[in-house]
Every structure is written in structure tokens, then in C-alpha cells.
Image: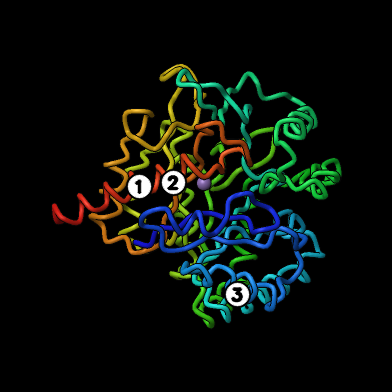
Amino acid sequence: MEMTFRWYGSSEERITLRQIREIPGVDGVVGCLMDIPVGEVWPEERIAALRREIEGVGLTLKVIESVNVHDDIKAGLSTRDRYIANYCQTIRNLAHQGIQVICYNFMPVFDWVKSDLSFQLPDGSNTLAFRGREIPDDPNVLLERYAQGTGNYVLPGWEPERLAQIKHLFEIYRGVGEEQLRANLVHFLESIIPTCEECGVRMAIHPDDPPYSLFGLPRIIKGREDLDWLCRAVDSPANGITLCTGSIAEDPSNDVYAILAEFTRRGRIHFVHARNIKYLEPGKSRDFYEAGHLSRDGSLDMFKIMAALHDNGFDGFIRPDHGRMIWGETGRAGYGLYDRALGIAYLNGLWEALEKRGA
Ligand SMILES: [Mn+2]
């Protein structure tokens, strides 16, 4: 297990690499190049510069989150071939700089969706939340809310230049149902996995967040059956999963512990997002907020989550997923320093207990 921390780059962050280095038990940074437009090749010299910067403080750069997939690929447009060729070149450039795992998702139009970016908790902290009745029918209303609530931080997956074309994006998915989206994902994977195998990179798809349809858009990575389909559709260890415990558990009918155990055993979980969520009305709705990592603060048993990984031989990368905003910190919603650092300390503690107890 290698513990990592997501970092957006020195021009995008107030959090410094030195601060990350001081968190006990962090091995590496999960990096990205936020300014490369989706679909374009990531230049190797830019990746090399990022790597030098990170290695300069004694951390590693082995995981990228995310190399986003152009919507022309997801919607299956005839223009997709150019973007697929670019994606393959990006994979080669990343591999050349020592990258082992690439996180991506295959969600149409939107990356993750939440209703609240600063949901107030009784302890005074705030966090991301999803309340179904607060999700507007018109996605533009949500965009407006995000524009006001992000404090000038660009949210990953919600880049303004992309969202400026939201009308166009909805149009290209007209007539694309789940079956077509699956076919488009298989086409993408069949085109890129040989390149990954050649250069030793593993792809790791992030589940849909939330794992059900919103705004009438199709969703295809929602639970155990979808992950099983994915693994069989292109049967290579290079075709793997970012298992996000929070996203999977956002549908309470998903058994997150069994899914972790099964796909770890099958050697397909290359990267884990460890997150606890708290259901707001258990049994009544799927509404939740993102809790601190501690088991007793949320609805998930984080010891059971770490045990499912440990006892099935997990040897991939893991990071705390989103954290709350605590101790007066402001910054990119979900990506503060303090609560994620506490998450790391806690997850590392659970792991040490599991190691010493023995499998
Ligand atoms: Mn996640």
C-alpha cells in the first residue's frame, strides 16, 4: 500500500508540497496538469517538470488524477479518433516519466455532482453534501451555484471552458443510452489498453458519482455488476479500477466491503479513494454528506474497508478522498489540507493495526 495525497500544482494551490511532506506516512502525490485542455497531449517536459518539483521534496509521482476523456470519445463521435491518438501519446509520455496508474472516469458532461459545497456540520466544520431535492432540474442552475461557491478555485471536472459549452454537450449525448455509452467505453479501452500494456501503465476508472442517472444522462459504472462487466469487456490487468468508497456507497444497495474484497482479489483495484459518508435519512433517501474519515463519524466502517483491502492482498495506491473544511481553512471544496491529513493519519493507523494483527 502506498499512501498518497492529491495535489493540483503550485499555480493552483495554497497547499504546498512541503506541507504534504510533513504529513506522517505520505509516500507520494497524486498529480495532474490542470491547464492542459481536455483531449490534448500532455507534453513530456511538463510532466517531467512536475515530477522534479515533487521529487525535490522527497515525495513520488506515480499516479495521475485525472487524464480526462474528451466528450467526443464518450459520445462516440467520428472526431474521437484524434482524441484517442492523443490519449495514447499522453500515456506514453506519462509512462516515460515513471507514472504507473492513470485515474479517469467515463461520466457524460459532468464529473461528480453535489448539491452543497459547504454543508454545515454541528461541530462547526463544513463539507460536501448531496441532497436530492436540492438538485435543480436545470443543470445551469447548479453551475451558477458552483460558480458562486468555489471561492475562485476551479473544481476538477467543472472547468469553466468546458462548461461554457454545456448546451452543446447535452446535444451530443442525445440518443446515447447506457448501451451505446458502454460500446463507446469498450472502443476507447480497446484502443488504449495495448499502449498501456506496452509501457506498463494501468488505467483505473473512477465510479460514477453519484452512481445513478442525473439530468437524464446515462451512467454505466455504478456497482458490482458494472465493474464485473468492465473487467470482462477488456480482460487485462491494465484495465482497472479506482475504487472510491464514498461514490460506491452513495447507492446504499452497493455492498462496498464485498466489492473491495472481490476486485482486490481479482487484481483490478489499482487505486483507492478512502472516504466516509453519512446518510442523512437512512432507509428513506440516498442523501448524504461527506463525513470525516473516522468510522463513528459516518455510515461506513472504515476498519472493515481497510481490512477488505489488506486481507485480500491490496498493494496499490490509496489516498484520503475529500475532507471537511476545519480549523478555519478555506480553499478548494473537499480538498483542504487539515482534514485530509487527519484522514491519512487515521487510515495509516488502521493499516498498521491490520499488519500487526496479521491476515
Ligand atoms: Mn473519489
Figure quadrant of the C terminus: bottom left
Point out the tag, 3 or 2, that comes first from the N-terminus: 3
Point 52% across, 65% down: residue: 63
Q: Which residue is mark 1?
A: 345
| Above or below, comparing residue 102 to residue 328 in the picture | below
Give the quadrant of residue 330: top right
Closer to the camera in the image, 325 or 80 = 325
Q: Is residue 191 left or right of residue 159?
A: left
Residue 334 spot, x, y in % from top left: 56, 39
Figure quadrant of the N terminus: bottom left
Q: Which residue is mark 2?
A: 341
Q: Which mark is residue 42?
A: none
Point 27% across, 61% down: residue: 313
Task: For the residues labelled 3 and 2, say whether their Cβ atoms are less than 8 Å apart.
Answer: no
Q: CA distance from mark 1 to mark 2?
A: 6 Å
Cβ(mark 3) to ligand 1 < 8 Å?
no
| Above or below, comparing residue 242 to residue 189 in the picture | above
Q: CA distance from mark 1 to mark 3?
A: 29 Å
